[in-house]
Image (spheres, rainbow, N blue to C red):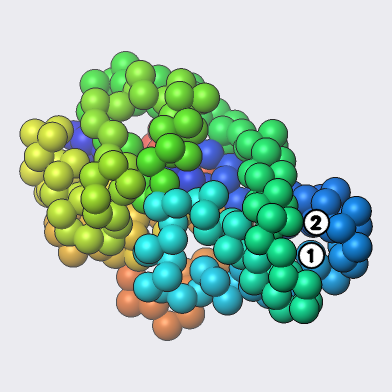
């Protein structure tokens, strides 16, 4: 491994953990005082979240402005209940975001693993999709920049995974050929299949041990449960 491209959310950082509880608590905190059934609203928001993010085109557009996206999700939930309120939707989204930040954490062993990779002389690029302000805040909050020679954020760069230009840009900045690089991440398409098409080796983080998606033709070069397993010379079974 002469270079490593690294995903951020749900690879280094527990980004998805606490999502359900944060939405539910935000609805409970604000809906009742507005005369809205908090339990029903939380259910409506859950339905609207799935509908909102399952649209691939919308996902690509909306993920670069997460506060805007969360506000739209809350607004859609309120509309589903027949209680539209842009003001309440904005307050719920803000409350949700605050709760998410309160529970967000790096996965155990991540700083130590990144430090050991740096000490071993492996140049690394952090390659992440999403909102530039949210992603920069994560990087600063968890002091991640010190580990990476290159940081590519979709909202700053203007393109996101799985577009080829993203990986090529990171490799060019590192001065490393694709055949000499690996990429690690939890998204089977963005962090494994797309890099493999360019000649990189792909490492899939299967944290829940769900196994490869049924019917997929993607074959990671390695599957790990945690990022820090990269330092284990013996691949996980």
Mark 1 to mark 2 CA distance (whole Å) = 6 Å
- Front-lying residue, 141 or 70: 70
Q: Which mark is residue 42?
A: 1
Q: In this view, does 136 lie above or below 55?
A: above
Q: In this view, does 71 lie to the left or right of 10?
A: right
Marks 1 and 2 in Cβ contact (< 8 Å): yes
Rendered image: mark on residue 27: 2
When asked about the image quadrant of residue 215, the answer is: bottom left
Q: Quadrant of the N terminus?
A: top left
For this view, does 164 lie left or right of residue 57?
Answer: left
- Under circle 1, the secondary element is helix
Of the two numbered discs 1 and 2 on the same chain, state the one appearing first in sequence: 2
Q: Which of 161 and 176 is in front in this view?
A: 161
Q: Is residue 93 left or right of residue 82?
A: left
Q: Nearer the viewer, residue 108 or 140?
A: 140
Report the residue at 24% width, 26% height from top. Answer: 149
Residue at 42 percent across and 70 percent down: it is: 58
Coordinates of residue 126 in the picture (x, y in percent)? 32, 37
Between 145 and 187, the one nearer to me in the picture? 145
């Amino acid at each position: 491994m002469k270079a490593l491209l690294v995903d951020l959310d749900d690879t280094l950082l527990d980004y998805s953990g606490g999502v359900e509880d944060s939405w539910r608590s935000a609805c409970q905190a604000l809906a009742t005082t507005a005369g809205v059934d908090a339990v029903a609203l939380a259910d409506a928001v859950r339905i609207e979240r799935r509908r909102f993010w399952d649209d691939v085109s919308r996902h690509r557009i909306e993920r670069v402005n997460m506060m805007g996206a969360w506000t739209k999700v809350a607004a859609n939930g309120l509309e589903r209940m027949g209680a539209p309120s842009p003001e309440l939707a904005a307050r719920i989204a803000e409350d949700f975001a605050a709760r998410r930040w309160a529970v967000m954490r790096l996965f155990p062993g991540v700083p130590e693993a990144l430090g050991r990779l740096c000490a071993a002389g492996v140049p690394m690029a952090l390659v992440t999709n999403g909102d530039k302000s949210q992603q920069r805040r994560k990087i600063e909050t968890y002091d991640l920049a010190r580990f990476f020679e290159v940081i590519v954020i979709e909202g700053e760069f203007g393109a996101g995974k799985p577009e080829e230009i993203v990986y090529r840009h990171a490799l060019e900045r590192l001065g490393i050929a694709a055949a000499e690089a690996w990429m690690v991440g939890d998204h089977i398409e963005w962090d494994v299949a797309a890099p493999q098409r360019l000649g990189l080796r792909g490492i899939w983080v299967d944290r829940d041990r769900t196994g490869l998606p049924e019917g997929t033709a993607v074959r990671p070069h390695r599957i790990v449960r945690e990022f820090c397993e990269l330092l284990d010379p013996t691949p996980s079974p």
